[in-house]
Image: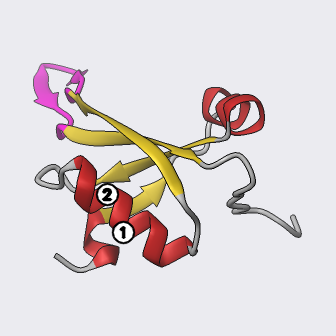
Amino acid sequence: MIDYDIIKKPLITEKTTLQKDEHNQITFEVDRKANRVEIKKAVERIFNVHVAGVRTMQVTGKVKRRGKILGKRSDWKKAIVKLMPDERIDFFEGA
């Protein structure tokens, strides 16, 4: 897999922003087939940082109703990447 196929997008929420500030952890949506080692290597290559650890979880898509029609959102995988103490990734540096 290519690095940009493994890391789909960063997740920016209130909780992930607090994790970034307090624990130096960044959260990404990743490919469902990617394992921890592949995710670690991809983050290190793309962002040029050193990774201390990776935790992953499978997120089940929610069941949603639109009138009588019942649908389901896609399942996806989330990775929480802990960076080394001196490392940093800034997504919105100038914003």
- In the displayed structure, 40 sits above or below 75; it is below
Is 62 magenta? The answer is yes
Q: Can residue 66 be seen from the camera position used here?
A: no
Q: Amino acid at mark 2?
A: Ile
Using the image as rendered, state which of residue 41 and residue 2 is in the foreground.
41
What amino acid type should be assigned to the residue bearing mark 1? Ala
Q: Is residue 93 at all visible to an observer of this figure?
A: yes
| 9 to 74, vertically: above or below | below
At 44% from the left and 49% from the top, the residue drawn is 28
Q: Residue furthest right?
A: 94
Does 3 sit above or below residue 8? Answer: below
* Relative image position of residue 62 (x, y in whole percent): 24, 23
Left or right: residue 25 versus residue 22 is left
Residue 9 sits in quarter: bottom left
Tell me how far mark 1 sits from mark 2, CA to CA. 5 Å
Say which quadrant the N terminus sits in.
bottom left
**Pointer 2: what residue?**
39
The answer to whether 38 appears left or right of 8 in the picture is left
Report the coloring of the rendering.
Answer: secondary structure
At x 75%, y 29%, the residue is 22
The disc label shown at residue 42, or none: 1
Residue 91 shows which numbered tag? none
Q: Residue at x 73, y 61 (%)?
A: 90
Instruction: Identify the secondary structure beneath mark 1.
Output: helix
Q: Quadrant of residue 23?
A: top right
Magenta range is 60-75
Classify 10 Å Cα crowding around label 2: few (below 14), some (14-19), many (20 and above): many
**84 and 35: which is toward the camera:** 84
Q: Do the numbered discs 1 and 2 sit on residues whose CB atoms are within 8 Å?
A: yes
Residue 2 rendering spot, x and y as whole percentages: 24, 80
Local SS, label 2: helix
| 78 horizontally vs 92: left or right | left
